[in-house]
Amino acid sequence: MQGTIVIKIGSSSLTAENGRLDAIQLENHVEAMVYLLKQDYRIVLVTSGAVAAGFSSLGFKRKPKGIAQKQAAASVGQSLLMQAYMDAFKQHDYIAAQLLLTRADFADQHRFSNISQTLGELMKRGAIPIINENDSTSVEELTFGDNDRLSALVSGIIHADMLCLFTDVNGVYDENPFSNPNAKKYSFLSEVPDALLKTMDQTTSDVGTGGMYSKLAAAKTAIELGTNVFIGTGSGKEKFADVLVGKGDGTYIGSFAKTSMSMTKQYILYHSKPRGSIYVDNGAAEALLKQHKSLLSAGVVKVIGSFTVGEVVDVRRENNEIIGKGKVNFTCEELTLLKGKNSAEIARVTTRSKKTVIHRNFWVAM
């Protein structure tokens, strides 16, 4: 197996000027993915386009702005979009599988784990998972913000080698290349600088929901999860293959060293909802951040919130600065009694076998 690639295709790369789904563009994307599949790569596709594909069928002249109108358009467009993908892949004797996700699927640890298992089983059996946000039933409008962020989170779940954010712009520039012809293009970035992120325009197009800001923010997340990123465009059946050999028309972002974050830590950092806060002294903070040690009760100075064993809490310095998140081995009541105590003192208070407040394997710095 060559590797695993997450490809995100935006609405602007799937629709015609009138807003309808462009079957020719979609088939061209599928042909390029099939070219990769035949080279023994595994692919997960994150696709936009449901709202854009459906709104004209409901009589809208352009993409609607209201939540109910968007959800109605998505409920029509999602089936049209998926059928087009399934037909296109079937022409090449491949099976496509649909997964509609919401943030709630990531927030629940059991459902989060099921996403990973389902994706793994589909790819093992040669199917191409096609993922989109479940816009038609989401409680909040586009709850991931856009599919750029969703694709970054998916790349972490499957420990992908590369995330390809395919768009209609050939990479990242220091300024808007459409308004400034002298804008400088970045061919490679080892990371996403905060200064560059702040300069990006967060406005969206009439067709898509995300601009370059959302792609850079997604790239930042993907890199933290251990996946390298390409932002750019291309044409022809070898356009995705070109990306993997360094010939892509765009910007490469990342260290390109093979690292990954465990599923447990991904859940803790990006998807869990803290149930309280643990305040620690400077010695404990340094041990966590610089020495990669577990948190012991001797370093705990204050406990806030209501939590039980195995739930996630924020960890803060005494000045209220958040330094990370982790799963606790004690209830809030137990920890209130144990804070500041050393191992010998703990042994006199509890017979619990686990003496660490947060083990380093269940801790993530922020």
Image: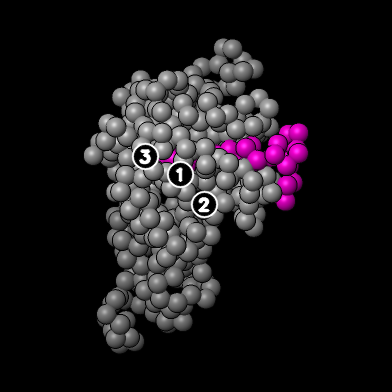
Give me the C-alpha separation between circle 3 and circle 2: 20 Å
Front residue of 250 and 270: 250
Q: Amino acid at mark 2?
A: Leu
Q: Which residues are drawn in magenta?
A: 43-69
Decide: is 362 above or below 177.
below
Quarter of the image with the N terminus in it: top left
Residue sitting at x 41%, y 33%:
91
Q: Count the marks.
A: 3
Q: Position of residue 262 (x, y in %)?
A: 33, 54
Q: Which mark is residue 130?
A: 1
Mark 3 or mark 2, earlier in chain: 3
Q: Amino acid at mark 1?
A: Ile
Q: Please, what secondary structure does the residue beneath circle 3 have? A: loop
Q: Nearer the observer, disc 1 or disc 3? A: 3
Mark 1 or mark 3, earlier in chain: 3
Instruction: Name the residue that disc number 2 marks.
Output: 100
Confirm whether residue 261 shows in the render: no
Instruction: Name the residue that disc number 3 marks.
Output: 94
Front residue of 327 and 106: 106
Residue sticking out furthest to the left: 1
Q: Residues within 10 Å of mark 2 (few under 14, many from 20)?
A: some
Does the residue at mark 3 contact the one at mark 2 (Cβ under 8 Å)?
Answer: no
Q: Position of residue 78 (x, y in %)?
A: 58, 45
